[in-house]
Image: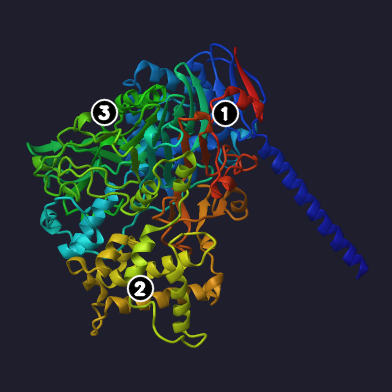
């Protein structure tokens, strides 16, 4: 027995030692791709020595003799820290994910190939101005210089993820940067899903109920929607939920997360220190690492610092010494679906106003890992590319013998959006920035500006010109052969809304409606916010003058105007129900929850139970109100729809009809449904977290899910590559944290401000910024998540253009010397 024990001990010790050795060897291989930020390089492609000074937070400050050398160094720095992310963005835009991931990404690649981003980007290189072409070429040279160092210097293949894949890293091309801009336009556009959803819902509901669940923005003078069944005969109503890819690798947004942001500015007259103020926090899906990367460039026009996207040679949101700029999604309706009739005698033709016409066609091959290649035929009409019915569930609203095509400003030419980004960085005034915005095609954005003299907001991006007689006004698919439905070019830039130096001295946008113009001069029928703007207005009006600190306070505000509106309305007849119910009963649990909500101010604080009770109640209530009318299509409304709930509980246009359960003989009141939904929500929460309501905590469920798109689901590895943080806020707070809406934890925070910046032109170097993870994309780097905890706590780091400050706290100093 003693001998057996000794052998078991030896075996166990051996296994432990071998495991430790394996971990050490693995760490050695993986850590080889960690760049040495103080290593110097001799490279071709630059004209003079270039300095890359990385401050204590690993923000590179780049100094060169020429702008070309600076762009080269930015490409080099991006590749050092985010090479895997850059190649993934490029593969996604090109429709080449399946070369790495096999069959699971074929449908993603198929749709991306139909958009033809890669081809459009190659064509767009030639139409950029000379300065932008030079920036694109220099940036590509810088990226390729680092790739060459990786290949020559045994630097762990450039990133740990590359060990999992055998594919070579293709050289970076100028067009790759432009294709990533196209990809960003896609991720900020949700009109396709909205059109399909509206068409399907119109087949299920009468017009008055459709206005409740998909309301037109209040104040718009809109003619009644046409009967979609008449436009698309033969399309049958269906309650099946939309089938849209939800893979972490999918670039296709759901309508709840199709871009959002906040930006506001104060004129010098409304600033305590006498200088203009600007705050900007763009909202996108969370990932590890963040999409954003902080950088400072010293250009001929001066220093510029702020947020870049790896793969793109520009500071897209930031400031110079003379100008600050921010961006929010403009929610312009720049996508239209068209029903195209296929010639029954010749499937290679489609109907146009002038008769039958041949589709433009070409074939493309998708290489698939561990499977046979997939060949698809790309077809194009005058309106745009033909999209498969399997995507966005377009087949459910496409009549037999027809296909669906897409018109989208991002697919137009010539696309000079990159030139606009370069000119914006070099602009020295609001007027120059507004002029640069004229060149943007997509995505449409609200450009918020501040300089020493004042503030402005300009809508940038191509606005489609529609005929006033358009059958659906772009809200649902329309027959593409009718001339009145087709686009007639784009509106002149002068028609884009512009706001300069308002009398109030304050400008702001939270994706709310920016202008009230009738169709077809409108921007959109669907806006990203009707709630946050109310809280922002309150915060702006409570002070005569503002400071950097008051702008930061507004960015981090977590009071929900939705909760403050809905709770008194929905719970009006539930708050006080007489004597306390016996302990342990559902009635007592309800009373305890209502007591907490009655004293709550609507702050979605991560440490409180009230936000969780409120969210669970409203979700259960909304589902009960709509599911018996629309069945499984209720899954498409997995987030709280405040306008719908307010219309029902105020009985606007008879909306309280939703409260009656159609299948039951009893006529239920809205109070009945509210009580039942609250009991249901509390039962679910108590089964999971216990019956002590006071111990529940919103932040335990509302964690920011900054997950690695590829390794985030891999057992064990996910604990090293995913970044999870308890967070405050929700879908409708200024510090936005959009909930997932479905799955095991529907309260997971999946979409929010990955970048925050506040710029003060009274003291520009007191400006601050932050991103939600870290600068590095390498999980073994201390800069992988070092900014994440500060972001969670609402802290910022300095945004200084002072070169001496950067050098004084440098973690690395690299000199690139010409060969």
Residue at the spot of label 3: 413
Residue 737: image location, x then y, percent: 45, 53
User: Is 370 left or right of 812, judged from the image as shown?
Assistant: left
**Quadrant of the drawing holding the N terminus:** bottom right
Q: Which mark is residue 571?
A: 2
Residue 644: percent from the left, percent from the top? 27, 63
Q: How is the image coloured?
A: rainbow
Check contact, mark 3 vs mark 2: CB within 8 A.
Answer: no
Secondary element at image label 2:
loop
SS state under label 1: strand
Q: Is residue 553 above or below residue 318?
A: below
Q: Earlier in the sequence, mark 3 or mark 1?
A: 1
Could you tell me which residue is drawn at 31 percent across and 30 percent down? 440
Q: Is residue 548 visible?
A: yes
| Of 775 and 759, the residue lying toward us | 759
Residue at x-position 17% and y-position 54%? 399
Disc sitting over residue 60 in the figure = 1
Residue found 53% across the figure and 50% down from its top? 707
Q: Is residue 376 above or below residue 675?
A: above
The mark closer to the camera, 2 or 1, is 2
């Amino acid at each position: 027995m003693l001998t057996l024990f000794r052998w078991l001990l030896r075996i166990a010790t051996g296994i432990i030692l071998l495991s430790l050795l394996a971990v050490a060897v693995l760490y050695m291989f993986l850590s080889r791709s960690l760049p040495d930020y103080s290593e110097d390089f001799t490279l071709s492609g630059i004209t003079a020595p270039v300095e890359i000074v990385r401050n204590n937070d690993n923000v590179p400050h780049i100094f060169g003799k020429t702008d070309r050398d600076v762009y080269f160094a930015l490409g080099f720095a991006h590749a050092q820290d985010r090479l895997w992310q850059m190649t993934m963005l490029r593969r996604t835009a090109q429709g080449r994910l399946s070369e790495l991931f096999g069959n699971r990404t074929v449908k993603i690649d198929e749709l991306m190939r139909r958009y033809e981003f890669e081809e459009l980007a190659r064509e767009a290189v030639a139409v950029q101005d000379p300065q932008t072409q030079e920036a694109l070429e220099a940036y590509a040279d810088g990226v390729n210089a680092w790739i060459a160092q990786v290949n020559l210097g045994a630097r762990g293949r450039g990133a740990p993820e590359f060990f999992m894949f055998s594919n070579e890293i293709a050289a970076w091309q100028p067009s790759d940067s432009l294709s990533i801009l196209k990809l960003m336009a896609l991720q900020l556009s949700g009109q396709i899903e909205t059109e399909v959803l509206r068409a399907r819902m119109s087949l299920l509901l009468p017009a008055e109920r459709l206005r409740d669940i998909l309301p037109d923005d209040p104040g718009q003078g809109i003619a009644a929607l046409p009967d979609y069944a008449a436009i698309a005969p033969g399309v049958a109503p269906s309650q099946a939920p939309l089938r849209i890819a939800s893979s972490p690798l999918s670039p296709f947004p759901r309508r709840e997360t199709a871009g959002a942001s906040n930006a506001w500015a104060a004129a010098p007259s409304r600033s305590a220190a006498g200088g203009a103020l600007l705050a900007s926090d763009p909202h996108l899906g969370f990932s590890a690492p963040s999409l954003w990367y902080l950088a400072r460039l010293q250009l001929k026009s001066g220093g510029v610092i702020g947020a870049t996207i790896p793969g793109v040679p520009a500071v897209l949101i930031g400031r110079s010494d003379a100008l600050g700029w921010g961006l929010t999604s403009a929610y312009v309706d720049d996508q239209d679906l068209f029903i195209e009739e296929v010639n029954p005698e010749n499937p290679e033709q489609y109907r146009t106003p002038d008769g039958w016409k041949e589709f433009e066609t070409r074939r493309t091959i998708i290489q698939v890992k561990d499977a046979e290649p997939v060949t698809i035929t790309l077809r194009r009409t005058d309106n745009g590319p033909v999209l498969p019915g399997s995507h966005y569930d377009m087949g459910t609203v496409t009549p037999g013998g027809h296909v669906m095509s897409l018109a989208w400003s991002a697919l137009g030419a010539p696309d000079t959006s990159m030139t606009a980004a370069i000119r914006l960085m070099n602009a020295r005034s609001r007027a120059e920035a507004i002029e640069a915005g004229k060149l943007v095609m997509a995505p449409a954005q609200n450009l918020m500006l501040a300089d020493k003299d004042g503030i402005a907001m300009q809508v940038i991006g191509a606005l489609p010109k529609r005929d006033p007689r358009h059958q659906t006004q772009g809200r649902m698919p329309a027959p593409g052969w009718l001339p009145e439905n087709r686009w007639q070019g784009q509106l002149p830039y002068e028609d884009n809304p512009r706001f300069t130096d308002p009398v109030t001295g304050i400008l702001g946008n939270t994706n709310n409606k920016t202008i009230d113009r009738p169709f077809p001069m409108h921007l959109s029928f669907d806006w990203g916010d009707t709630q946050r703007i109310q809280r922002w207005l309150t915060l702006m009006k409570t002070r005569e003058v503002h400071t950097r600190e008051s702008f930061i306070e507004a960015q981090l505000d977590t009071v929900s105007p939705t909760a403050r509106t809905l709770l008194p309305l929905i719970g009006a007849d539930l708050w006080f129900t007489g004597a306390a119910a016996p302990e342990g009963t559902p009635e007592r649990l309800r009373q305890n929850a209502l007591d907490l909500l009655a004293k709550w101010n609507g702050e979605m604080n991560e440490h409180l139970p009230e936000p969780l009770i409120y969210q669970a109640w409203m979700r259960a209530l909304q589902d009960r109100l709509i599911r018996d009318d629309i069945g499984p299509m209720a899954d498409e409304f997995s987030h709280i729809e405040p306008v719908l709930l307010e219309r029902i509980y105020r009985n606007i246009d008879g909306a309280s009809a939703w409260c009656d359960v159609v299948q039951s003989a009893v006529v239920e009141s809205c109070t009945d449904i509210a009580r039942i939904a609250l009991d249901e929500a509390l039962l679910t929460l108590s089964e999971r977290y216990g019956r002590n309501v006071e111990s529940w905590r919103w932040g335990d469920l509302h964690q920011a899910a900054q997950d690695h798109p590829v390794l985030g689901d891999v057992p064990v590895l996910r604990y090293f590559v995913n970044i999870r943080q308890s967070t405050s806020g929700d879908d409708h707070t200024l510090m936005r944290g959009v909930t997932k809406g479905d799955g095991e934890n529907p309260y997971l925070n999946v979409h929010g401000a990955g970048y925050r910046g506040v710029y003060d032109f009274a003291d520009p170097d007191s400006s601050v910024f932050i991103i939600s993870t870290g600068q590095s994309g390498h999980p073994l780097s201390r800069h992988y998540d070092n900014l994440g905890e500060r972001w969670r706590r609402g802290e910022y780091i300095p945004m200084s253009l002072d070169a001496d400050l950067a050098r004084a706290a440098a973690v690395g100093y690299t000199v690139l010397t010409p060969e």
